[in-house]
Image: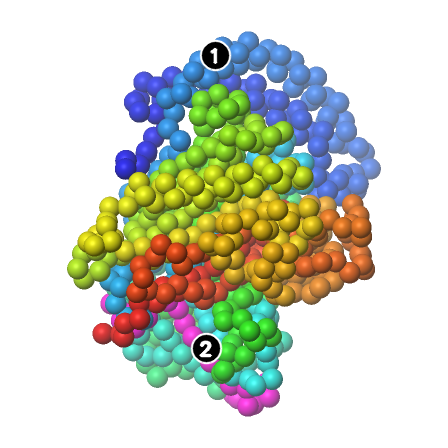
Amino acid sequence: MVLYTSPFPNSFLSVLHSFSWGLIFPCYWLADRLVASFVPTTYEKRQRADDPCYFHALCIIITTPIYLALLVASLPFALIGFLLWSPLQSARRPYIYSRLEDKNHANGATLLTEWKAAGNGKSFCFGSANVCLLPDSLARFNNVFNTQARAKEIGRRIRNGASRPQIKIYIDSPTNTSISAASFSSLVSPQSGDSTNRTVNAGIKRTTSMEYKGDNSGSNNGEDSREDKGGAGEPNEGEENSCIVRINGEDNGHMSDTETGTINGQAHASGPAEASLEGDTEISKTPNDKQKEGDSVSLDSYSASRESLVKVRVGDGTVDQSTVNNKLLYKASIMKKTSVRKKKHTDETFDHEISAFFPANLDFLCLQEVFDKRAAEKLKEQLHHYFEYIVYDVGVYSCHGCCSFKFVNSGLLFASRYPVMDAAYHCYPNGRGTDSLASKGALFLKVQVGSTPQDQRIVGYISCTHLQAIAGDTTVRCEQLDMLQDWLSEFRKSTSSSSTANPEELVAFDVICGDLNFDNCSSEDKLEQQHSLFTHYKDPCRIGPGEDKPWAIGTLLDPEGLYDEEVCTPDNLQKVLESEEGRKGYLVYPTSKNHSSSQKGRKASLKGNGRRIDYMLYTEEGLYLEWKVEVEEFSFITQLAGLTDHLPVAMRLMVSTGEDDP
């Protein structure tokens, strides 16, 4: 199957499309700004409440007639552009595939070595998020604004979170059974040797908090780190760029002088090591900080962190305190295990947490509601610093390909560190209401993640979708789930190049990600909860229809509280969501007799831990029979606090081959 790298089959149609959109855009932009000026967010309302001169009201009185006059003047040109634009959509391709040709541009990504299906197996990490990148006037109805700036900042946060080292802290304590992300700060001291995984024994206080200031130099040692990575051994193919810290529980939280020195950045290692800066040197702030009106996500301020560390890599030389203090502050997502894997929920077999960061070494990313095309370009540009392969601008426009007129695309975007072999898109034909104006559908992808010594390709399947959003449209969503399964089955059959007798490729995983717009606790969603999709695909957060696991939380945030000081930063939102009372104040809960429009301070007992409408599903059906797939980690992520009204989710799958290390 040919992957489409441009929206039209020839340059003439592309030029004609650009010309027609150039005629439409002034009218579109003026209408968007006009509506946006009358839909303030809670952040803007708070700013304007401190304005005694009513400056904003005066601006609206002056600018509204100007906007209206320019809008009327642009309408004839927009009409001509529309008459050209609409027929062209019949020749438009359903997506654009972008591959990063300049490898030096991917500063944050480490070089992927091809998996040869040797050793115990390999892990793959998947992420999904609804980022609400609509035109600014429409985004404001979800209490978010400044779509173009948010798109750039969302991409920056994702790549910075994914490109950090994978730090695992194992706490050997028979009494500590908590599995939520803790408030630690540590500088890891790598052991000597070529191994990628390093282990340091240290005692750490729970209340330790420190910060290393960066020098904003903007330097990047991506190439050096890749060379270093290439020279390192790889005892476990499932963990790249990872570092392991073991914390013993016998000291009752007291640290020795040596351990204290380690925490303060004086690494005591048996072999040489050096610290290096990787990634971007800009740290963002949320709209809660002081800034100019309308600049919702300025990128130039620093914020204190309760989980911070400096990126460290193994190399030649020693770790110098002054060198460490001049490196950028980075944070670590911390996973806590006991020596016998004892957890708060003892029947669980994998790690789960509320994390302030996207997982390290994120392999695949599925995004929803990337509707604005200019925002999609900005987001793509940022993600290409980490992901080499991106599929974006997915969907159809006008009356072509679906039953009703489509003003915007599907909003789906897919990013991968592994090459995409095939891709297909289908539009749901049964959308209703406002959802029918967007070409919501499903994007199916086949990626190559390695090869066997016998030159058999190792592939995986990933599906990204966004279902009908309007409450009460249960039947529509169930029909869309039926179509999703049928389309996926057809895609796998049409892209498979092997037979059972002579397999040319081995399937390692099959994952479905997306915003399904129903939860597993609401009584109104019973039909979706019992859909046959959940008999073929497993939901790591689900016990059964109508019942989630105790640690699972909702992914839909209360829009009214997005800019509250308690939740406006990733760390603050993480703290709030770790408590039941905090979740009741800032998550949307399943509708019930206790439901009210304002959730602040609600004391009533509610079912579940919020509406979990963003899903990550996997299956064991149709995979290579000799391999086993199981969940290694599941995370609810707060790194996009203040930028969207959804919580991203991430899942790490371990594909076990059953073979011993060579």
Q: Which residues are magenta?
A: 231-257
Quadrant (top left, top right, bottom left, bottom right) of the C terminus: bottom left
Quarter-of-image position of residue 392: top left
Q: Is residue 219 left or right of residue 605?
A: left
Q: In this picture, is 61 found above or below 186?
A: above
Mark 2 crowdedness (10 Å alpha carbons): few <14, some 14-19, many ≥20: many
Q: Which residue is mark 1?
A: 83
Q: Amino acid at mark 2?
A: Val
The picture places residue 630, in percent across and down from the top left corner, at 43, 65
Count of numbered circles in the view: 2
Tell me which residue sits at (49%, 21%) in the image: 398
Q: Is residue 508 visible?
A: yes
The picture places residue 332, in percent across and down from the top left corner, at 50, 66
Check if mark 2's residue and mark 1's residue have beta carbons within 8 Å: no
Tell me which residue sits at (36%, 65%) in the image: 628
| Membership of 232 in magenta stretch | yes
Distance between mark 2 and mark 1 Cα atoms: 63 Å
Q: Which residue is mark 2?
A: 245
Q: In this picture, is 79 found above or below 319?
A: above
Question: Which colour assignment does the render follow?
Answer: rainbow
